[in-house]
Image (cartoon, helix red, strand yellow):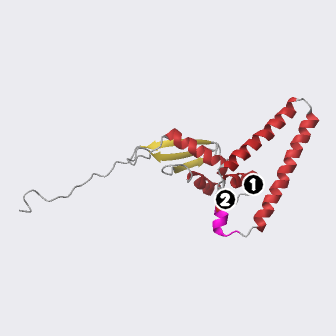
Amino acid sequence: MSAAPAPAHAERAGRRVEAALDRLAATGDPAATAAAEELVASLMEFYGAGLARILDLLPAPAARTDELLGDDLVASLLLLHDLHPEDLTTRIGRALDRVGGTRPEVLGHDETTGTLRLRTVSGTGCGCSSTAPDVRRAAEEALACFAPEVTAVEVSTEPGRSEPTLLQIGVRPGAGA
């Protein structure tokens, strides 16, 4: 099952709803704007109740639950309706598992500012190091679905760990004669 296209469609749908509400607000008709906002809120409530009911009725073996909670679109919908069963720390971990290369280490999360501080290792010698901006961008994208409470990401880069010295063992010249 491929979940890649779903978040893009959901994002587009969200932008279309926002654009439609903005167009109504621009008309200057407060009654029409209020009615549209009430309609959106009612639909959100309706779909949220439906999602909650699905979760209640779903016989959820651990593997299926993990698959559902790991899906970008499902995670976003559950968070939008305040139904996601995982805590913030677990959701941050789930998001960071999606960051390419070596998983960044969480240094801390400031709940007041929404800033998540990460550390990553650069130049590990394996040819797979990422720059801090790359890691930050990938983390922000993943966190948008799984932990929208994180509003900023700071990445510090630890210098690459030195590779162990290669010790070559051989026969001492003249020892085999």
Depth check, mark 2 against mark 1: the one in front is 2
Rendered position, 66 above or below 103: below
Point out the stretch of residues depicted in magenta.
Answer: 60-66
Question: Where's the N terminus, which quadrant?
Answer: bottom right
Secondary structure, mark 1, is loop
Q: Nearer the viewer, residue 94 or 1?
A: 1
Mark 2 or mark 1: name the one nearer the start of the chain: 2
Rendered position, 88 above or below 115: below
Disc 1 marks a residue whose amino acid type is Asp
Residue at point 39%, 49% (across, down):
126
Please tell me the numbered disc located at residue 82: 1
Residue 63, magenta (yes or no)? yes
* Apparent side of residue 134 relative to residue 37 in the rendered image (left or right): left
Q: Residue furthest right?
A: 31
User: Mark 2 sits on what residue?
Assistant: 69
Could you say where residue 27 lies in the image, as x and y percent from the top left?
89, 29
Could you say where residue 5 lies in the image, as x and y percent from the top left?
67, 48
